[in-house]
Amino acid sequence: MICGGAYWTWDAFTSGKIQTFVESNIKEKWAPTAEDSLATMYEMTERYGPAIICYRKLVEILPDNSPLAEKSSYRIAVCLSQWNKMPDALAAFDAFLEKYPNSEFRDVAQRRRAAIFNR
């Protein structure tokens, strides 16, 4: 039973079924948390394109002062750098630092940005 459940979950994740379900219910109270979890799973499995899509959706639907929007903006930049999209990563870090100058992620974002810039 556990193997069947794990297979169904992995299949739903890798096929995009979960993302489709969450995004079709994005106005629901639980959806932003689910979208963030999905983005994190994509990121952890090095599927940066889908992770960025999820994080961008969160930035789009949440107010700017939302901690989840702030985190998502930062994670977009990180995913781009991990995906080796350095010009886009630089732009994303710049946008993040401009929008959230007092963020808890500011120092690490500045270091990551400097590391890319100094390559």
Image (spheres, rainbow, N blue to C red):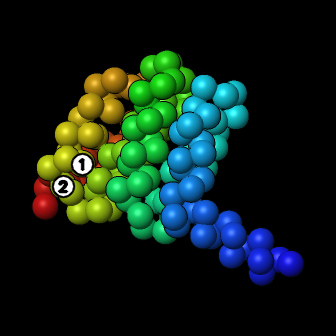
Residue 72, given in percent of the width and then of the height, sits at: 46, 39
Kindly check if marks 1 and 2 are in contact, taking CB atoms under 8 A apart as contact: yes
Q: Is residue 29 visible?
A: yes
Task: Tell me the tag on residue 89.
Answer: 1
Residue 44, given in percent of the width and then of the height, sits at: 51, 64
Q: Nearer the viewer, residue 28 or 79?
A: 28
- Residue displayed at 28% across by 25% down: 98
Instruction: Determine which quarter of the picture holds residue 105.
Output: top left
Task: Tell me the tag on residue 29.
Answer: none
Within-10-Å neighbours for mark 2: few <14, some 14–19, many 20+: some
Amino acid type, callout 1? Ala
Question: Vertical placement of 40 versus 14: above or below?
Answer: above
Residue 89, given in percent of the width and then of the height, sits at: 24, 48
Amino acid type, callout 2? Met
Instruction: Determine which quarter of the picture holds residue 26.
Output: top right
Q: Which residue is mark 2?
A: 86
| Residue at the farthest right position | 1
Side (left or right) of 20 relative to 98 = right
Question: Vertical placement of 16 versus 32: above or below?
Answer: below
Side (left or right) of 19 relative to 59 = right
